[in-house]
Amino acid sequence: MKDTQGGGMDGFTPDNTMGTVFIRIAVPELKVQKCLQFQLEHTVWQAKQRVLTAFAKDLRDPLNYGMYLPPANGKAGKFMEEERLLNEYPIQGPIGFLEFKYKKRVYKMMQINERKLKQIHSKSKLKLFMDAVRAGNIEKINKTTMKGLDPNFHDQDNGETPLTTAVTLGKSKCRDVIITLVSGGAHLDFRNKQGLTPLHRGAIVGNAEAIRTMLDLGASPDCKDARDLTPLYYSVSNDDTVQDCTHMLLHERARVGICDEHGWYEIHQACKNGRVQHLEHLLFYGAEMDVRNSCGNTPLHICALNSQEACARVLLFRGADPTLVNYSNQTADQVAALAGNTAIAEMINSHNPDDVVPYREIPQYSNRRKGASLTPSLRALLRTRSDPRINFAGLDDIRSPSSSSSPIGGLARRQYGGYRMVDSDSACSISISSAGSVTGVTDQGLYEGRKSSGVEGYFPGGHLSQNVRRAGSMGDVNVVSRGDNQ
């Protein structure tokens, strides 16, 4: 890699020029520029990670640096949203130009006195501002930001930001405080000292109102923290998080299938902590029920080890494979027996595959985010015929896993804000009516037919490389291997 003030080419390979773009990245703080090659289908977050590894010198608080699109053609400059694709932004010229800057307030049409601006950012003034945020003092917050205070900073005492503090406030205060801070220049993804965004903090403390507000303001449900984990991962991992938070994130197209450094996925965490309703939501929205962690343990193994009988029952009921072994060559019932959980071991041994009832309905999503954010695994999610009464236009209605066929009881009917959770009385009914092996082809290229086992559903038409059992599929189905499977 060459480092030149004029911008040396980096990463160029003659065989890899399709779908790429060269961008000259300037880092004002380091007074250096480099020309890097990026994949257009990559997200801004992925491009950001490449920039962070490209510069030898350490940056202060690197996760709070952002790709800045300078003013052009009469349009104001702005920080690029990290979960959007690079090709969604206008990169002008044969070699584009972006700045890599620390995320500060972008002052627009404000007469700023530099001396007064420095005074208002003194330690004492910042401390008073944090006190106002914790107290929910909207008037003082608004007055201070109108004077020019930048709300993107860290509290000297605990490393929190004004926005990560606001999402921990009570339901009666948090929404107004969050909106006031964002109106005053707070970035939706400005991270605290732990690398957590406000949406991560809201998921950890289980504040559904704060999560709803952040999503309403445009925060991405797939924002990453310092460990590359999403709010959904924390939502199913913490005891304080109510199921409404998980359901809300999934409805807003949060990606399912994020794992930590130990290979633990969201579904592993839900099973470890006995989060039955969260598990139902994950399965309904396409989580792989037999996915393995770094030790080869499936979610059923985790249930067996941690004595989570209710979660194990849900997994078996939805089609988890009890015969899979981990990397120690142990099945889930053997793990349960070794852990002294004999009741779970007996339940797994007595499981009858004929009792499996997969989901038949297709999950519905918010229409304010593009479907391009869906993962390949969710796109490949295959289901049996869905209830013809599903109204695809009613995207404000969230269909939850049915309570009529669940072994542990269903999700309560409730309404909160613009979201409504509705129990379906036919979510798991099975109907086999086709007489041939293949009865038709859908507009999406899926074959409609019946397997040799007699199970009817939709199946991919190509010759595919691996078999994966998914919630909502009838038995083993072939799935396209795209290199980024969960």
Image (cartoon, grey):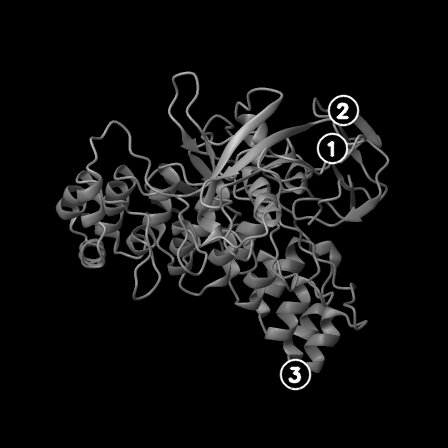
Q: Tell me if 486 is positioned left or right of 372 in this view.
A: right
Q: Which residue is mark 1?
A: 433
For the point 77% across and 39% down, the residue is: 480
The answer to whether residue 389 shows anywhere in this view is no
| Mark earlier in primary sequence (3, 2) | 3
Q: CA distance from mark 2 to mark 1?
A: 16 Å
Label 2 Cα crowd, 10 Å radius (few <14 / some 14-19 / many 20+): some
The outermost residue toward the top is 73
Q: Nearer the viewer, mark 2 or mark 1?
A: 2
Q: Residue at x 81, y 31 (%)?
A: 15
Q: Residues within 10 Å of mark 3 (few under 14, many from 20)?
A: some
Spatial separation of the CA atoms under disc 3 and disc 1: 45 Å
* Residue 11 visible within the image: yes
Label 3 element class: loop
N-term-proximal mark, 2 vs 1: 1
Provide the residue designation for mark 3: 340
Q: Is residue 99 left or right of residue 461?
A: left
Residue 69, position in %: x, y? 46, 30
Kindly state the secondary structure of the residue where label 1 is placed.
Answer: loop
Looking at the image, which residue is at 51% across and 51% down?
230
- Quadrant where the N terminus lies? top right
Give the labeled residue for mark 2.
441
Left or right position of 391 against 94: left
